[in-house]
Amino acid sequence: MNISVVIPLLNEDESIPELYAWITKVMNANNYSYEIIFVDDGSTDKSWREIEALSKSDNHVRGIKFRRNYGKSAALHEGFQHTRGDVVITMDADLQDSPEEIPEMYDMIVKDGYDIVSGWKKKRYDPISKTIPTKIYNGVTGWMSGVKLHDMNCGLKAYKSDVVKSIEVYGEMHRYIPVLAKWSGFNKIGEKVVQHQARKYGKTKFGMSRFIYGFLDLASIMFIGKFGKRPMHFFGALGIVLLAIGFAILLYLSIDKIFYKTANINDRPIFFFGILSVIVGVQLFIAGFLAELITRNSYDRNKYSIEKII
Ligand code: UDP
Ligand code: MG
């Protein structure tokens, strides 16, 4: 099979039939063998009924229904487990992404050998409250992770099948899939300018919380990617620095006190800084040891992304 289209959705019943018809038109025009996997992330409207009806009339359509809302990442992850195509396309259900982009993205994967092609909504039809923070977010993410994309979180992306089978998208990590892929060793990551439309029906499913969660997820992803298998290197390194600073300060104060009979040590502000530094340093070591104990028993510790075995 050439293409699996994975569509996570939450309460998008008005868009589904239109989206389905549009994708089908593009697929048929290009003679692809394909499937469309709708993942209903706990919708409370008629979305699932629409999906059921489509799957009855067309066996290209498959559906997965969550019992409750787990979030876009969970929906994508579940969809990824079921794909059968060589290339996997993800797109939002709200008709903001255009299926007309699929053939070119498909070619970039199959002919040009990209692992991922990420859409870039160069001209966006979203409120300014979203476009400006997004610019900052893309800059910070690129700078921290080394994956420089103009539009990291674009819902429209194409993947080599291997990619979606190797990565684990959880929490709200769907914003960082290219970074997750890079940590797994897929580094041919491309970008394609895509058409974007204003939302036709319904309203956005993400509020302002996206910015806080987005930042926290970036911190986690950087930490796990770099130190997930060796947490002590992170905590221990910080701990050593703080302990060294603390000891140096306390040693200096002690020498001063013993040999030069300075007045009360506890009148000196630096004394408290020294103590704080030692305590926090010790705690970082404890955190490091605990993290090592936890990863010791984790299933992930010796899980590596393997490309080939001969
Ligand atoms: N979505 C989802 N689960 C959620 C929130 C959103 O499956 O908990 C889907 C939503 O239905 C849409 C896609 O994720 O298909 C993108 O969401 P939305 O269009 O609301 O985000 P925006 O375009 O505003 O960033
Ligand atoms: Mg949208």
Image (cartoon, grey):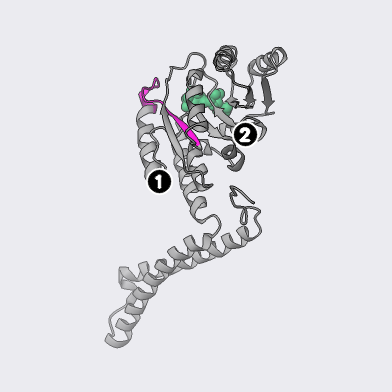
Q: Position of residue 196 (x, y in %)?
A: 43, 20
The residue identified by callout 1 is: 146
Give the residue type at disc 2: Phe
Q: Position of residue 197 (x, y in %)?
A: 43, 17
Magenta stretch contains residue 118: yes
Q: Which residues are magenta?
A: 116-130
Q: Residue at x 68, y 26 (%)?
A: 64
Q: Residue at x 60, y 43 (%)?
A: 166
State whether label 2 is within 8 Å of ligand 1.
no
The residue identified by callout 2 is: 80
Q: Is residue 306 above or below residue 201?
A: below
Horizontally, is 171 left or right of 139 in the view? right
Element marked by disc 2: helix
Q: Is residue 219 visible?
A: yes
In the rendered picture of this protein, how many numbered marks are placed on residues? 2
Q: Position of residue 112 (x, y in %)?
A: 47, 33
